[in-house]
């Protein structure tokens, strides 16, 4: 009993702290801003014709391990899905039938995220996670159509638990993005930033700075320090008013310099969760000269007001905390799983996705597949053009697991053609952060015999050990 009581008291205190009510307007503001952002993102796909480019026209897709069962939609199905997601995101922003619209949006967006590896982007993955958390949360408790249509009388508060969970998710993204930059390439050689900035030396005003030999190093260190520290600085009330303008400037610059889509917008708006929970109400009070009604408090009889854990719900709260802890551990484990593999993760890419390694590598490559029929000795040279569009080929050419997937498809096709066993070898060359091009895949290995999976890939050759060349601005 003596060993259980201290643990029990600690859990009770933790539950009590996380159960304390805070103004729900921070979560309502996040719901509105996130919903509007994702609605614009879906509309951009419709407007720019990206649905056909990325989902309809490709005849081959790269499947995530374990998600091979996902089936493609028809052309009409994909277009309908994007229109539906646009409407669902708007409904989610308005808080209309929130539990239903948020769930449907989360499922539909998750389908797009896990349908094709070649379309992976960090901010799509982040949007998937945030939509999942948003669906679980009571984000419709205030400032929502649901509250008025269904005359919800629940207090306009949420538990502190939700605030900490959203902060944790954003902090994970920033912190691991910073840790990913703690490499010699980024800090000592200023690569790949030096390569990218060399193409912006004619930019108005900033071009003169980019032409300086120290510019890439200054910006590399600034990016490293920003990503590593910004989330933790935003948690300090005294520093928030100074840190958030820096965050806006940083994401604004990256949006101007690099084509990274909605990521800067999502991060800029998402970082508002680090402010006081009542910040939206305070802003509106200032704008309306104090005419906004203050938050409806919890009744005095509520145990959370008295600083007590609700006894009848303690088991349920412990279950919720356990599930939240499992989620948090998963978010920590995914970026760290690269430690299970030897070598340079930027080269072999095992553990690269879902790890928040944002803009830390510039890779280019070329791939040719060689099919051999052992029975006759006949050889075919197969170009990826036969299976992939230019966007897919660019993604595949530097990612070994995608090369392996296409090799398996070629193996299956030529088995049908020859009615016998075939070998599939590959001549894959790649360049990492401006280094000289070298072999990525062992050409002696028969990829037709290598299974897909998460085990260390022995067919990938060692990463280059020479430093990247210094890029001199023009």
Image: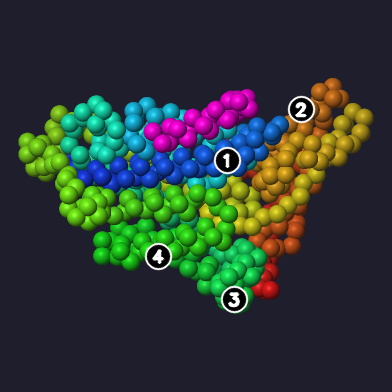
Above or below: residue 358 compared with residue 53: below
Left or right side of 322 for 456: right
Q: Nearer the viewer, mark 4 or mark 2?
A: 4
Above or below: residue 156 compared with residue 153: below
- Say which of 341 and 288 sits in front: 288
Determine the residue positioned at 50% across, 46% down. Answer: 123
Q: Mark 1 = which residue?
A: 47
Residue 208's label in the rendered image is 3
Task: Tell me the element at label 2.
Answer: helix
Q: Nearer the viewer, mark 1 or mark 4?
A: 1
Q: Mark 2 = which residue?
A: 412
Q: Mark 4 = which residue?
A: 246
What's the CA distance linking mark 3 and mark 1?
Answer: 35 Å
**Extent of the magenta region:** 64-91
Determine the residue positioned at 20% across, 39% down. Answer: 156
Residue 408 magenta-highlighted: no
Indicate which disc, 1 or 2, sits on the residue closer to the N terminus: 1
Q: Nearer the viewer, mark 3 or mark 2?
A: 3
């Amino acid at each position: 009993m003596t060993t259980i009581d201290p643990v029990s008291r600690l859990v009770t205190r933790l539950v009590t702290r996380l159960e304390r009510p805070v103004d729900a307007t921070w979560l309502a503001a996040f719901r509105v801003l996130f919903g509007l952002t994702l609605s614009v993102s879906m509309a951009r796909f419709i407007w720019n014709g990206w649905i056909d480019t990325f989902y309809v026209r490709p005849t081959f897709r790269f499947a995530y391990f374990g998600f091979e069962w996902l089936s493609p939609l028809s052309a009409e199905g994909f277009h309908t899905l994007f229109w539906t997601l646009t409407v669902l995101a708007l409904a989610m922003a308005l808080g209309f039938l929130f539990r239903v619209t948020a769930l449907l949006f989360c499922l539909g967006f998750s389908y797009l995220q896990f349908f094709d590896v070649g379309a992976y982007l960090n901010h799509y993955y982040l949007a998937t996670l945030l939509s999942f958390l948003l669906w679980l949360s009571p984000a419709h408790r205030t400032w929502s159509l649901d509250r008025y249509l269904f005359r919800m009388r629940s207090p306009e508060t949420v538990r502190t638990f939700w605030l900490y969970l959203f902060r944790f998710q954003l902090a994970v993204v920033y912190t691991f993005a910073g840790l990913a930059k703690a490499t010699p390439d980024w800090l000592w050689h200023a690569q790949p930033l030096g390569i990218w900035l060399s193409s912006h030396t004619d930019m108005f005003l900033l071009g003169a700075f980019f032409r300086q030999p120290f510019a890439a190093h200054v910006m590399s260190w600034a990016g490293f320090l920003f990503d590593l520290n910004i989330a933790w600085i935003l948690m300090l009330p005294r520093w928030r008013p100074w840190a958030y303008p820096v965050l806006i400037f940083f994401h604004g610059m990256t949006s101007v310099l690099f084509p990274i889509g909605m990521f800067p917008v999502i991060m800029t708006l998402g970082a508002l969760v680090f402010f006081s929970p009542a910040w939206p109400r305070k802003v509106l009070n200032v704008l309306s000269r104090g005419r906004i009604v203050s938050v409806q408090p919890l009744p005095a009889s509520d145990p959370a007001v008295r600083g007590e854990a609700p006894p009848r719900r303690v088991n349920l709260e412990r279950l919720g905390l356990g599930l939240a802890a499992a989620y948090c551990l998963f978010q920590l484990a995914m970026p760290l799983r690269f430690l299970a593999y030897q070598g340079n993760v930027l080269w072999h890419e095992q553990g690269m996705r879902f790890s928040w390694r944002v803009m830390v590598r510039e890779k280019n490559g070329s791939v040719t597949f060689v099919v051999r029929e052992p029975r006759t000795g006949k050889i075919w040279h197969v170009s990826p053009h036969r299976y992939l569009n230019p966007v897919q080929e660019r993604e595949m050419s530097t990612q070994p697991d995608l090369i392996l997937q296409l090799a398996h498809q070629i193996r299956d096709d030529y088995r049908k053609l020859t009615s016998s066993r075939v070998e599939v070898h590959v001549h894959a060359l790649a360049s990492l952060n401006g280094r000289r091009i070298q072999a990525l895949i062992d050409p002696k290995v028969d990829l037709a015999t290598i299974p897909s999976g998460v085990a260390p890939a022995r067919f990938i050759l060692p990463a280059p050990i020479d430093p990247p060349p210094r890029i001199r601005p023009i």
